[in-house]
Amino acid sequence: MSTPPPREHLPIRPIWLCRVDAHPWPCGAARVALLRQYDGDMIGLAVYLAGMLHDAAADLYALNPHEAPKPSALWDRFLAWLDVARRSQPR
Ligand SMILES: [Zn+2]
């Protein structure tokens, strides 16, 4: 018997919650996976996340314009953590 592969922490669209743990995407596990996947290419990762932020904003506002997260909250959620991750990288 083989163990099933670990499930990837990907967003359920258009609600943008993690399909594994139901935390707002990118959840902690998704952030770790993305950092590993981009392997130090912080610019590439930032470009990817900016695109995801754009899609999430469009989806969430379309879903519920009155209760969609503020742009500043989406910025914190999608991109601000990268700065912390970048600063903690070894040089
Ligand atoms: Zn997750």
Image (spheres, rainbow, N blue to C red):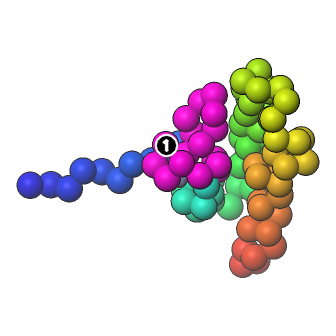
Pinpoint residue 26: horizontal percent, then vertical percent.
Answer: 64, 50
Tell me where the magenta segment starts and ends, as one range: 11-26
> In this rendering, would 11 be left or right of 69?
left
Residue 57 percent coordinates (x, y): 79, 32
Left or right of residue 5, residue 91 in this image: right
Indicate whether 49 appears above or below 59: below
Check the image and report above or below for 33 versus 86: above
Q: Which residue is drawn at 85% across and 49% down?
A: 73
Asked if residue 32 can be seen in this view, the reply is yes
Magenta: main secondary structure equals loop
Q: Is mark 1 on a helix, strand or loop?
A: loop
- Residue 17 belongs to magenta span: yes
- Figure check: 47 above or below 60: below
Residue indicated by mark 1: 19
Badge 1 amino acid: Arg
The residue furthest top is: 62
